[in-house]
Image (cartoon, rainbow, N blue to C red):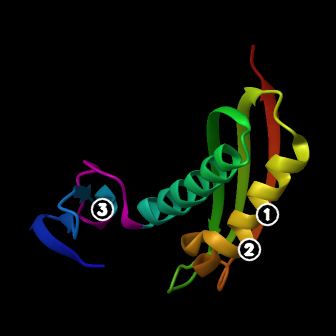
Amino acid sequence: MECTVKWVDGMSFLAETGTGHLVAMDGAPEAGGRNLAPRPMELMLASAGGCTAFDVVLILKRGRQDVRGCEVKLSAERADIDPKVFTRIAFRYVIRGKGLKPEAVARAVHLSAEKYCSASIMLAKTAEITHDWEIVEED
């Protein structure tokens, strides 16, 4: 896997992934940024959410569950001093579908957290991570 990050101007950067996708990043105004794009740490948190959401949806689909929606709401705390690593992250899953089995959802969240989601497993080296979920029934 490869990625190139180029400084644009001020405190703005543009990443080009190995698959050719572009991601903009910017700093906070108090750090010289212009608030034009997410901060790098925001993207790290979003990446963990995307990684686990991907896992959960895939596991539920493979388990023949009628999953129709998946949101992962993340709330994180960071250390007060440098390096300001994440120290706590709460993952809250809202899974929508028809007739979803709670044990299937619990299993999917557990497998993602313990085995498949490289991003959140890596972040767990510095952060206390919690997971909870709810099912929203759809017709």
Q: Is residue 57 above or below residue 124?
A: above
Q: Secondary structure at mark 1?
A: helix
Whether 32 is among the magenta residues is yes
Q: Is residue 18 above or below residue 56?
A: below
Depth check, front residue: 35 or 128: 128
Disc sitting over residue 110 in the figure: 1
| Residue, disc 3 | 27
Q: Secondary structure at mark 2?
A: helix
Residue 12 in sight here: no
Q: Is residue 115 above or below residue 112?
A: below
| Residue, disc 2 | 114
* Residue depicted at 13% across the width and 71% down the height: 6
Whether 94 is among the magenta residues is no
Mark 3 near mark 1, Cβ–Cβ under 8 Å? no
Q: Is residue 68 left or right of residue 82?
A: right
Mark 1 near mark 2, Cβ–Cβ under 8 Å? yes
